[in-house]
Amino acid sequence: MQVDLPTIAPMDRWLARLSFSFFIIAAVLVWEIYKSMIGERGPVPQWRIALYMIATVMCIALGAMGVRARHRSNL
């Protein structure tokens, strides 16, 4: 008798592996946004700060998806 075990999609596997890394990258981006906004990085264009903010949100979302994939029960 053959039992079919649930499989994890390759994308979910990579998200689960890289979830903590996405949170670290998001923290670094927040630090860069902070340093840019207080003027410690010199003159920084506003589009770069906006791009950092978008990338931060995306990293947090990917990290959350990875945590969900890691802790998903395959019942």
Image (cartoon, rainbow, N blue to C red):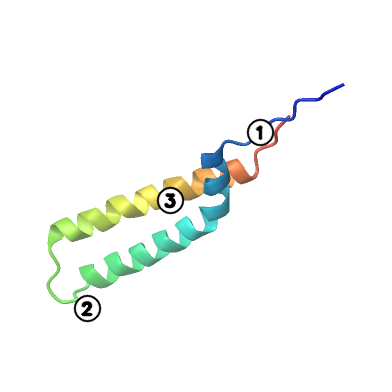
Q: In the rendering, at what x and y percent does residue 37 appear?
A: 22, 68
Question: What's under tag 2, amino acid-wise?
Answer: Glu
Q: In the rendering, at what x and y percent does residue 58 appear?
A: 37, 48
In front of the other: 18 or 54:
18
**Gap in angstroms between the C-alphas marked 3 and 2:** 25 Å
Q: Is residue 13 rendered to the left or right of residue 40?
A: right
Question: What's under tag 3, amino acid-wise?
Answer: Ile
Q: In the rendering, at what x and y percent does residue 21 appear?
A: 49, 60
**Gap in angstroms between the C-alphas marked 2 and 1:** 48 Å
Can you tell which quarter of the image residue 27 is in? Answer: bottom left
**Closer to the observer: label 3 or label 1?**
1
Can you tell which quarter of the image residue 26 is in? Answer: bottom left
User: Residue most toward the front?
Assistant: 1
Q: Which residue is drawn at the image coordinates 34% and 68% (left, top)? A: 31
Q: Which residue is mark 3?
A: 60
Q: In the rendering, at what x and y percent does residue 46 appear?
A: 14, 59
Q: Which residue is drawn at the image coordinates 43% and 51% (left, top)? A: 60
Q: Which residue is mark 2?
A: 40
Q: Which residue is mark 1?
A: 7
Q: Is residue 49 rendered to the left or right of residue 7?
A: left
**Gap in angstroms between the C-alphas marked 3 and 1:** 25 Å
For the N terminus, give its image quadrant.
top right
